[in-house]
Amino acid sequence: MSFITDRKRVDGLGSSHNGVSHWMSQRLTAIALIPLSLMFLFPFIRTLGADHAVMLQTYAHPYHALVAVMFFVTLCKHLQQGVQVVIEDYVHGQRMLLTSLILNKLVWGGVAVIAIFAIAKIAFSA
Amino acid sequence: MADANQSNRPLSPHLQIYRPQITSVLSILNRITGNGMALTAVLIAWWFLAAATGVGYYDLVNGFLTSWVGLLIMVASLWAFWFHFFNGLRHLRWDAVQGMGMKTVRRSGWIASILSVVATVLCILLAM
């Protein structure tokens, strides 16, 4: 029989294992995405479907290249956080849960790196 | 583990018992649109990577994204974006503990829904 109280046993071991940092970070990326998503969206929907040369010309411009990079970095962080909440809600079992959470981080880190590399290559070579 | 009295607790009513309401429908739509746009983000990153690779690969990916399947995904994503955008503004307002009365919550929900459709149509017109 344990003499530890119920309160002491669960202290710091809630289902999330941490405090408000995830919540706060998700709000900060959301706020940052309000201007960034709009600045990315309008040039993008006008460029999608354009010829290769036109596309390169658009995103070789420092404004569009920088907006696209800032947008993708913030977006990938926000997506990682959003998908994490869904994983935490629907994936059960310690092993599956941890594997999914780590894979989720690797995927969005990877997407961000791919986007940054591609945009930088366009911006620096045109 | 805290397993005392776990087995014979009453269950809460299942989801399908409840009548759909604007609040609950928009809540799950926020999650569906947000996570759905994960695919769109990957597709757009692919589009950039293809453009950086060369004209042949770009034409392939650009062609796919503007085929009828691609356009269906992009238009659905466009609506998903605007819905998530306007509904996200509702969430940020709630985080500041504003507009939380039931009447206001329902009204802001309808406003976000209508604005998402209007903005989607305007963007499609802009893209054409």
Image (tube, rainbow, N blue to C red):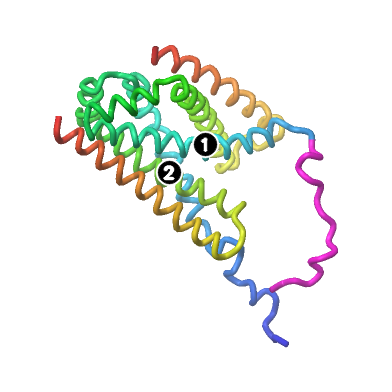
Q: Is residue A32 above or below residue B1?
A: above
Evaluate whether residue B84 shows in this view.
yes
Give how far across and how far down residue B2 sits, in percent: 72, 72
Name the element at disc 1. Answer: helix
Magenta stretch, main secondary structure class: loop
Q: Is residue A8 above or below residue B104?
A: below
Q: Is residue B69 above or below residue B11?
A: above
**In the image, farthest residue toward the left:** A125
> Which residue occupies 37% across, 33% down?
B44
Local packing at callout 1 (Cα closer than 10 Å; few below 14, some 14-19, many 20+) is some
Which stretch did the figure color magenta? B1-18
Give how far across and how far down residue B80 sits, in percent: 52, 29
> Which residue occupies 69% across, 79% down?
A5
Question: Dot 2 falls on which chain?
Answer: A
Amino acid under disc 1: Gly
Give how far across and how far down residue A76 sits, in percent: 40, 44
Question: In the picture provided, is A17 more to the left or to the right than A123?
Answer: right
> Which residue occupies 31% across, 21% down?
A47
Amino acid under disc 2: Thr
Mark pair 2, 1: CA separation: 18 Å
Name the element at disc 2. Answer: helix
Local packing at callout 2 (Cα closer than 10 Å; few below 14, some 14-19, many 20+) is some
Give how far across and how far down residue B40 sits, in percent: 44, 34
> Which residue occupies 61% across, 34% down?
B29
Q: Are marks 2 and 1 in contact (CB under 8 Å)?
A: no
Question: Dot 1 falls on which chain?
Answer: B
How many tags in the picture? 2
Circle on res. B36: 1
The C terminus of chain A: image quadrant: top left
The residue under label 2 is A29
